[in-house]
Image (cartoon, grey):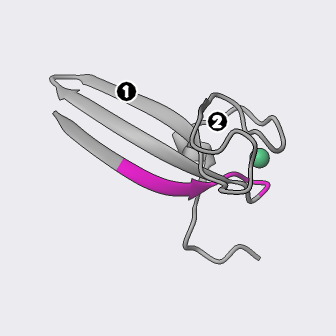
Amino acid sequence: MFEELVARRCVCSHAITVLLLDAGEQLCTIAFFDGESTSDSYDERVRECPACGERLGLHRLLPRSSPEG
Ligand SMILES: [Zn+2]
């Protein structure tokens, strides 16, 4: 069982925490959590960005550490 937390950011800059769960074989589950500590839904599981409503996808999120111009 593999588990990893990845800090990402929505295109609107809202912080999103991505939980990657790999139970082996080809099973891999991705869950998104609100990573913005000031947000009402902080630490809750979300499917869309709480800020802009954008549907979340791992490939659509930006690395949180990377400066966004
Ligand atoms: Zn957003």
Q: Which residue is mark 1?
A: 29
Residue drawn at the location 37% of the way across and 27% of the way down? 29
> Gap between marks 1 and 2, in whole Å?
14 Å
Instruction: Please determine whether, in this image, residue 11 is positioned above or below residue 1.
Output: below
Q: Is mark 2 within 8 Å of ligand 1?
A: no
41 horizontally vs 63: left or right: right
Residue drawn at the location 81% of the way across and 35% of the way down? 53
Q: Which residue is mark 2?
A: 56
Q: Is mark 1 within 8 Å of ligand 1?
A: no
Mark 1 surroundings: few (<14), some (14-19) or many (≥20) residues within 10 A: few
Residue drawn at the location 26% of the way across and 41% of the way down? 3
| Residue 57 on the magenta span | no
> Contact (CB < 8 A) between labels 1 and 2?
no
On the image, the x and y values in percent for residue 19 come to: 41, 41
Mark 2 element type? loop
On the image, the x and y values in percent for residue 7 come to: 50, 57
34 horizontally vs 25: left or right: right
> Label 1 amino acid?
Thr
Label 1 vs 2, first from the N-terminus? 1
* Magenta span dominant secondary structure: strand
Instruction: Please determine whether, in this image, residue 52 is positioned above or below residue 9.
Output: above
Which quarter of the rendered picture does the N terminus lie within?
Answer: top left
Residue drawn at the location 71% of the way across and 73% of the way down? 68
On the image, the x and y values in percent for residue 51 come to: 81, 44
* Residue closer to the observer: 13 or 39: 39
Q: Quadrant of residue 63?
A: bottom right
Which quarter of the rendered picture does the C terminus lie within?
Answer: bottom right
Which residues, given as a range, are shown in magenta?
A: 5-12
> Label 2 amino acid?
Leu
Mark 2 surroundings: few (<14), some (14-19) or many (≥20) residues within 10 A: some
